[in-house]
Image: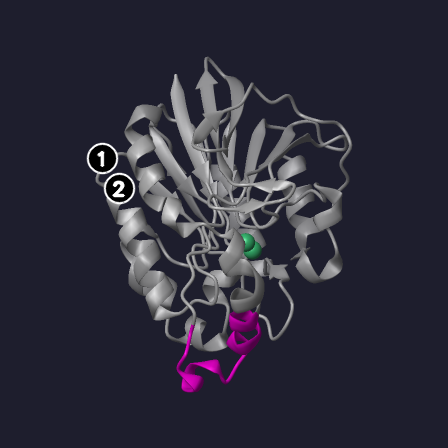
């Protein structure tokens, strides 16, 4: 049996008061933070998650990106302390960046994600193949990039080619993909063009054409969903809740995934006056590709 914990969209935040740091898209993100996000991203729950973590008896921790909000040095430091504390429990930690981790072109130039998490990355921006405890292959696919205004993701032709090569190299059997952006347009109310994955349809076809069982773990949409692709039934997608959220229709949470003899059980957890494990999720049926 292998137990994976998938957390995503932590969105550690720190309000910027230095005007020199606000000469870019961050001025919008900071305004959003001041007026809205600081009220529903309860980063003070970080310690309660750390306290819970050993009892989950996880074999691996997967982090789906958006660890920060406007990709400042201060937010990265908060996120790194959190991740390093969890890593001290002695299990492998795998991660990918979200669009908020590359919020400004300056944060990308400064290679802030690599600076704080480089020891956990093969090469940022390049797909990589790992193996989970128990031997299931894990394909980490980068899908985020900085944008002037939108929250749109992108996977380049080179990244698609690298993904295809790694898919061919991975031993047969079930495979897990870790990415920030969903590859199916569920939940549908989060699927508008400005928030979608550019070239997502190509990635979708690439994964579908393998015919092998693929569990695709994504974030970005901030709500839990579990979907089997009607076009490629070998493809199952899970989006996890934003870890520290507390918003109407958007409770905070994470996802526990248990592999037993090739069978997968999916248990969403929610925060409701404490972390609560909810009943096993069955995949829903309505989904379409991007
Ligand atoms: Fe997010
Ligand atoms: Fe995102």
Instruction: Assess whether residue 18 is covered by the magenta stretch.
Output: yes
Query: Which residue in the structure is indicated by mark 1?
Result: 90
Q: Most prominent secondary structure in the magenta stretch?
A: helix
Please state the horizontal and vertical placement of residue 89, each as a whole percent of the image: 23, 35
Instruction: Assess whether residue 77 is covered by the magenta stretch.
Output: no
Query: Which residue in the structure is indicated by mark 2?
Result: 87
Please state the horizontal and vertical placement of residue 251, each as a whole percent of the image: 56, 40
Would residue 107 be found to the left or right of residue 183 on screen?
A: left
Would residue 70 be found to the left or right of residue 193 on screen?
A: left
**Total marks drawn?**
2
- Taking the image as drawn, is residue 143 in sight? no
Would residue 16 be found to the left or right of residue 81 on screen?
A: right
Q: Residue at x 48, y 45 (%)?
A: 8
Foreground of the two, 62 or 187: 187
Q: Which mark is residue 75?
A: none
Q: Residue at x 53, y 52 (%)?
A: 40
Q: Which residues are magenta?
A: 16-31
Q: Quadrant of residue 46?
A: top left
């Amino acid at each position: 049996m292998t137990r994976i914990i998938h957390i995503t969209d932590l969105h550690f935040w720190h309000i910027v008061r230095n005007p020199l740091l606000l000469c870019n898209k961050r001025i919008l993100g900071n305004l959003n933070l001041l007026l809205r996000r600081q009220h529903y991203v309860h980063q003070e729950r970080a310690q309660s998650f750390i306290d819970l973590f050993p009892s989950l008896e996880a074999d691996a921790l997967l982090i789906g990106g958006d660890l920060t909000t406007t990709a400042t040095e201060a937010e990265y430091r908060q996120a790194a302390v959190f991740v390093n504390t969890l890593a001290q429990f002695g299990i492998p930690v795998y991660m990918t960046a979200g669009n908020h981790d590359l919020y400004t072109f300056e944060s990308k130039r400064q290679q802030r994600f690599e600076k704080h998490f480089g020891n956990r990355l093969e090469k940022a921006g390049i797909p990589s193949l790992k193996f989970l405890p128990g031997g299931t292959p894990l394909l980490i696919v980068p899908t985020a990039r900085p944008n002037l205004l939108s929250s749109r993701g992108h996977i380049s032709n080179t990244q698609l080619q690298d993904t295809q090569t790694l898919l061919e190299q991975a031993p047969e059997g079930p495979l897990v993909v870790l990415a920030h952006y969903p590859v199916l347009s569920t939940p549908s109310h989060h699927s508008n063009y400005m928030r979608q994955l550019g070239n997502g349809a190509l990635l979708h076809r690439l994964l579908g054409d393998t015919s092998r069982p693929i569990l695709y773990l994504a974030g970005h949409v901030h709500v839990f969903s579990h979907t089997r692709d009607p076009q490629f039934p070998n493809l199952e997608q899970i989006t996890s809740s934003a870890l520290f959220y507390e918003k109407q229709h958007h409770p905070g949470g994470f996802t526990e995934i248990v592999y037993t003899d090739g069978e997968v059980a999916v248990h969403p957890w929610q925060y409701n006056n404490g972390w609560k494990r909810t009943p096993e999720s069955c995949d829903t049926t309505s989904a379409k590709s991007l």
